[in-house]
Image (cartoon, coloured by chain):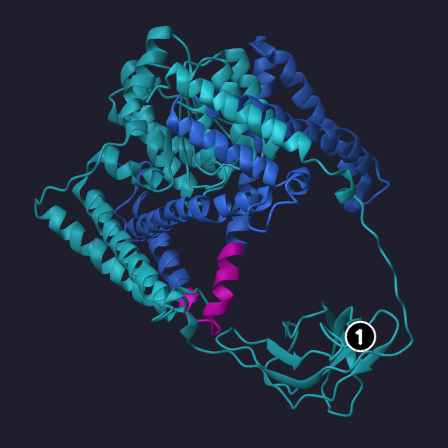
Chain colours: A blue, B cyan
Amino acid sequence: MRREVPLMICAIVGFTLIIVYFVPHPPFSDMRDLFSDWFSVIAAFAIYLGILNLLKNSVDKVYRKRSGWGFSIVTIAGFVLFVFIGLYEGSDFGEIGTRYYWLYDRIYFPLMATMFAILAFFIGSASYRAFRARNVEATVLLLAAFFVMLGRVPIGYYLTSWLPEGWRMSDVASAIMTYPQMAGQRAVMIGIALGIVSTSLRIILGIERTFLGGE
Amino acid sequence: MKFTTLSGSLLKLFLFGLVLFFIFSFNPRAFCQDTTIVTDSIPPGPPSNVVAKDTPYDRGRSITINWVKSADDGGGANDVKGYEIMRATQVDGDYELIGNTTAGAQYFIDNDVRDKVSYFYKIRGTDGTNTSVSLPSLAAMSKPQWVNLRRTNIFIFVVALTFAILYYINRAKAGKELFIRKIAGLEAVDDAVGRATEMGRKIFYIPGISDMDNMQTIAGLTILGRVAKVAAEYEARLEVPVSRSMVMVSAREVMKEAYSNAGRPDSFNEDLVYYLTDDQFGYAAAVDGLFVREKPAAIFLMGQFYAESLILAETGNSVGAIQIAGTAAPAQIPFFIAACDFTLIGEELFAASAYLSKDPKLLGSLKGQDVGKVIFLAAIILGVILFTFNLMDIGPWFAVG
């Protein structure tokens, strides 16, 4: 029963959503939103499991002084601070001018932006490895990247603006992106779409059950 | 193919030539642009032929309005800034503004109507200062349709693919041997876990940042089952930090089952799977911290990733871990290829469970998938030939409605 019930729910919801895709008439049209709402409700309840797990692990780490326990103190302090300030502010806690908003705007948001900004350096280091002209394939990649990157910025356009249309840097970049890049990406996309359809069918038909802990 | 010294020198010469070419062809005056603002008091020509109809093949509650744009939109004074859509329930009633569009637009979809109620529409062209209004449309009424005929092509394809998959599953069950090509990333799972065991370091498994409603997360968890089983057999320590509570619960079930199947149920501990945060970059920061502090020997990145993919993969690379990644997010695949040792590209992620389990039913479904590829390939070749010789454009047959 522990396996059969989830499999049955998967099958019923899966078949219903397939019908919904082709039949827009009520009541089917409302079912997609209904299932989506149910998922949100379940996910909202499940978040407490996650929060409790995070707090349990953090407190345990601090108590046992395990590796990185100092970070756990920051985690607990941040959690307590945000929860209490949010509760103190009441239902308008997210409005501009509240203490909660100040914390979000001055601490949380800059931290997220910093993490995102680090990506620029990682792109540099990854590109350095990927674009080294060690063989013919890597050289083709290097040249394609050179033309695309320069063709996508204004300086690339202005540097070659005297060339006839179709031969400028931006045109070369567009050609690379429109033909070889697009063809390759579409091939990958077709494979992905078929993979998703096939996996969905396996789940709906109950053939695929590894995600439920089955063999 | 290694470069000879001569070809390496030629490449350097080429790049040097390109740099010189750009330096000498630089024209700073091209950056300057003149702008002039012109205003007038003459209203633009009114839009005409306003036609409102029930939006076809939908769930109802929607009317599509089409019109012929103003004579001063793209021609004449060419000063139309946009159009305002006005609606009333009586042809000579009070028309209220319900939306607007930019210049050049010739249709608007009103999704805020009730079924079986008549609506009339007028379109007002504006140049920012002056306006001119069209004549009203005839009455339009929305109603839901039973079948979305625009999706007939998808229906046919899904039915064909389903039959192909079921056919090959039955063939596989009947004992027919099916060939499946080697997937290097999946072959390397045992080596990666073995390396971690030998080095006495941890293995981290990152199942992406999406929830259980994402097929990639589910595909990632099927691979986790295999990795957990091998880790249990080798007695290596596998940890799964997750960003979704439901993924945490599912991953625990998968690992628990894998440890049982490996004959080591006692080695499983629920704390091996733990929640960090739902936040994208908060999760990336936390996982990066784990990588840097714990210095794992092997890292698996399997599932749906966004901008954090390279942040995770480059950090993993910097600590010297063997990395096996897999995602069906096309924008992230190049990052994983650049930063990881092995990458499951797109469909390989979904084929993993069949590949690893060798279950005939799952392998049969992969073969059925190949039929879908053959259909697409044949359609592409046929479409290119017909279009090249100007015989027919079959593109619309594959349009998704």
Q: Name the kind of residue labelled 1 in the image.
A: Ala
Q: Quadrant of residue B303?
A: top left
Q: Main secondary structure of the magenta part?
A: helix
Q: Nearer the viewer, residue B67 or B328?
A: B67
Residue reaching furthest to the left: B175
Q: Nearer the viewer, residue B223 or B260?
A: B223
Task: Classify residue B218 as left or right of residue B83.
Answer: left
Screen quadrant of the N terminus of chain A:
top left
Residue B111, how many percent across, how many down? Answer: 63, 72
Q: Is residue B42 magenta?
A: no
Q: Quadrant of residue A107?
A: top right
Q: Does the image show residue B364?
A: yes
- How many numbered circles does the render carry? 1
Screen quadrant of the C terminus of chain A:
top left
Q: Can you say whether B2 is above or below B85 in the image?
A: above
Residue reaching furthest to the right: B41
Q: Can you say whether A55 is above or below B123 in the image?
A: above
Which residue does the image show at 87% across and 59% down from the upper left?
A: B36
Residue B12, how many percent across, how many down? Answer: 50, 21
Which residue does the image show at 35% across and 60% down from the upper left?
A: A15
Q: Does the image show residue A126?
A: no
Q: Which residues are magenta?
A: A21-36
Other-residue count near label 1 (Cα within 10 Å), few / some / many at <14 / 14–19 / ≥20: some
Which residue does the image show at 54% across and 12% down from the upper left?
A: B293
